[in-house]
């Protein structure tokens, strides 16, 4: 029997599947056992959510938001404790663990606060007696599938907006971070939210697939491109379903001949190594102008050699472990691949020295920075495929900023990117031509705030399962027109006369 349960229809239920463990990636400690959701468990949750929808949608926005305000306060009150749990379960260092919780309450605040903001538009009509509006209705049941790297924030990106808009939810947390899932479900339970409005099923990809195939009205997915494209294709088979996906990228920082190199080096280190390279927005490419290349390389390499990898609960750690064995393997596989592709390796801390691994953490999933340089070649796989680790290419370019932008855009993805330059023309050119959903000037390409749309272009996803854009995914628009006259008058000069034979 697992120590914890699913949360379905206001009850803690064991479900029909096996158990699985959550493991601390820093030291291999088992953090808890959880039930592995089956298709039947998901079906029960979807049925409960469907049943609860009619009464939930009848509440006002403000009344629905009240439940979220409870969670907002709890997230704030338990900041330290929850930050530590995030760090223990997904391995990111403690300031990031806490920032994850902060980002969660920011999104809850945004969604619950938005309950008191205008929704929809008043639209003028050609006909003076007509009132026309764009109104919104909730779609119904929203299936939410979320990743391990932001195990508290991203669930609230999806769920806070969905719920305030009047939908009910079925959520599957990532299998690497079920403890965070458990705590969030406990918080919802504590609010007394009506049964079936919020449901959580723990589990793996098969439970996620059951949500996607199930009787849900919208699917929100944040995670890997591999899985996300399958989700989008599956949902597209049913035209009545909506999907909003946000996947990874092969993000880049462009450092021009006019860059302030202090800003460039700082931005590049943050973009490439924060979260041990495991953000969808992390940068695995640094595209650097020839005039500043040697100095930038020297400074970046020195930091990559010395940046601290260690116990993520220690405040002076910059990089914690990666999340699990599959991430370690993928990282090594790509490091081997780039060697085969003939690049020049500049930093290889992929296998950390025993001395670098903190005492008592030998069972952790440790890797360090891996940095290489290469001539730009559009055929190189290493410049196109996402590794999701501290694996970084330095690519030198010559000529104007358009050349850098051309290299920058030559990837299937388009999530995040940055330009570092003191020349506003270069910055604005990048802003206008970089194919990304999130673009930064003189900053790292990580660290977006919740009130901005968070989503990519090209293979990085469709829609943005986040803040205002999430509203599009979880509501239907109605163009509602009301006649205030007892005569019927039509737009476009259309005759309203009913002509008869006599
Ligand atoms: C992710 O990269 O998976 O912009 C999410 C950021 C965070 C969210 C990242 N606010 O870096």
Image (cartoon, rainbow, N blue to C red):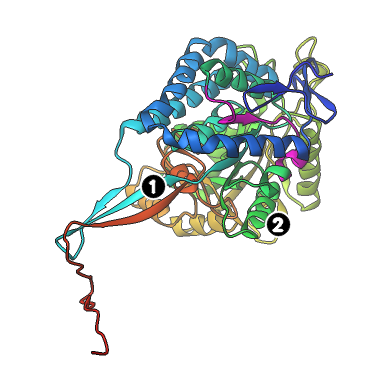
Numbered badge on residue 185? none
Relative vertical location of residue 397 with respect to residue 9 in this rendering, above or below: below
Verify whether residue 197 appears in magenta.
yes
Please give the residue where the numbered disc 1 appears in the rendered image: 136
Q: Which residues are magenta?
A: 193-209
Q: Residues within 10 Å of mark 2 (few under 14, many from 20)?
A: some
Residue 407 versus residue 220: which sits nearer the camera? 220
Please give the residue where the numbered disc 2 appears in the rendered image: 380
Helix, strand or loop at label 2? It is loop
- Indicate left or right for 379 with 417 as reference: right
Some atom of ligand 1 lies within 8 Å of the CB belonging to the residue at label 2: no
| Residue 61 falls in image quadrant | top left
Q: Is residue 444 visible?
A: no
Relative vertical location of residue 322 with respect to residue 363 in this rendering, above or below: below
Helix, strand or loop at label 1? It is strand
Which mark sits nearer the N-terminus, 1 or 2? 1
Q: Which circle, 1 or 2, is nearer the viewer?
A: 1
Q: Residues within 10 Å of mark 1 (few under 14, many from 20)?
A: some
Tally of numbered tags: 2
Give the residue at x 29% y 39%.
Answer: 118
Where does residue 119 sit, x and y in percent of width and height? 33, 42
Alpha carbons under labels 1 and 2: distance apart: 47 Å
Q: Are marks 1 and 2 in contact (CB under 8 Å)?
A: no
Verify whether residue 10 appears in magenta.
no
Relative vertical location of residue 113 with respect to residue 207 in this rendering, above or below: above
């Amino acid at each position: 029997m697992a120590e914890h349960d699913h949360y379905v229809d206001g009850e803690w239920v064991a479900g029909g599947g096996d158990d699985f463990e959550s493991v601390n990636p820093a030291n291999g400690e088992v953090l808890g056992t959880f039930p592995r959701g089956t298709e039947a468990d998901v079906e029960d949750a979807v049925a409960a959510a469907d049943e609860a929808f009619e009464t939930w949608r009848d509440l006002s926005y403000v009344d629905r938001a009240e439940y979220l305000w409870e969670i907002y306060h709890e997230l704030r009150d338990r900041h330290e404790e929850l930050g530590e749990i995030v760090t223990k379960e997904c391995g990111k260092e403690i300031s990031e663990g806490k920032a994850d919780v902060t980002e969660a309450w920011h999104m809850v605040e945004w969604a619950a606060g938005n309950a008191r903001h205008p929704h929809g538009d008043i639209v003028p009509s050609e006909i003076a007696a007509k009132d026309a509006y764009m109104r919104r209705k909730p779609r119904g049941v929203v299936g939410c599938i979320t990743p391990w790297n932001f195990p508290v924030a991203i669930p609230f990106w999806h769920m806070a907006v969905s719920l305030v808009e009047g939908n009910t939810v079925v959520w599957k947390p990532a299998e690497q971070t079920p403890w965070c899932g458990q705590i969030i479900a406990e918080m919802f339970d504590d609010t007394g939210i009506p049964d079936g409005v919020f449901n959580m099923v723990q589990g793996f990809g098969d439970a996620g697939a059951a949500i996607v195939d199930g009787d849900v009205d919208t699917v929100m997915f944040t995670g890997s491109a591999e899985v996300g494209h399958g989700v989008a294709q599956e949902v597209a088979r049913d035209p009545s379903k909506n999907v909003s996906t946000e996947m990874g990228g092969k993000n880049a920082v462009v450092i021009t001949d006019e860059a302030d190199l202090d800003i460039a080096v700082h931005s590049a280190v943050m973009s490439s190594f924060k979260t041990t390279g495991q953000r969808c927005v992390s940068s695995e490419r640094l595209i650097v102008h020839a005039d500043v290349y040697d100095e930038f390389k020297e400074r970046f390499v020195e930091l990559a050699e010395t940046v601290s990898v260690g116990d993520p609960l220690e405040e002076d750690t910059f990089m914690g472990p990666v999340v699990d064995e599959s991430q370690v393997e993928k990282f090594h596989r790509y490091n081997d691949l780039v060697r085969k592709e003939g690049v020049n390796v500049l930093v290889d801390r992929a296998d950390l020295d025993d001395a670098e691994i903190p005492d008592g953490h030998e069972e952790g999933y440790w890797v360090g920075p891996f940095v290489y340089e290469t001539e730009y070649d559009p055929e190189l796989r290493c410049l196109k495929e996402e590794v999701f680790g501290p694996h970084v290419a330095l690519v030198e370019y010559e000529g104007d900023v358009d050349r850098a932008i051309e290299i920058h855009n030559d990837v299937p993805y388009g999530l995040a990117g940055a330009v570092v330059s003191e020349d506003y023309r270069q910055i604005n050119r990048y802003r206008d031509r970089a194919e990304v959903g999130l673009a930064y000037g003189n900053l790292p390409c990580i660290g977006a705030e919740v009130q901005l749309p968070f989503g990519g272009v090209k293979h990085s996803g469709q829609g943005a399962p986040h803040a205002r854009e999430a509203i599009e995914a979880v509501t239907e628009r109605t163009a509602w027109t009301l006649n205030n006259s007892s005569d019927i008058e039509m737009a476009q000069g259309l005759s309203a006369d009913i002509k008869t034979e006599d």
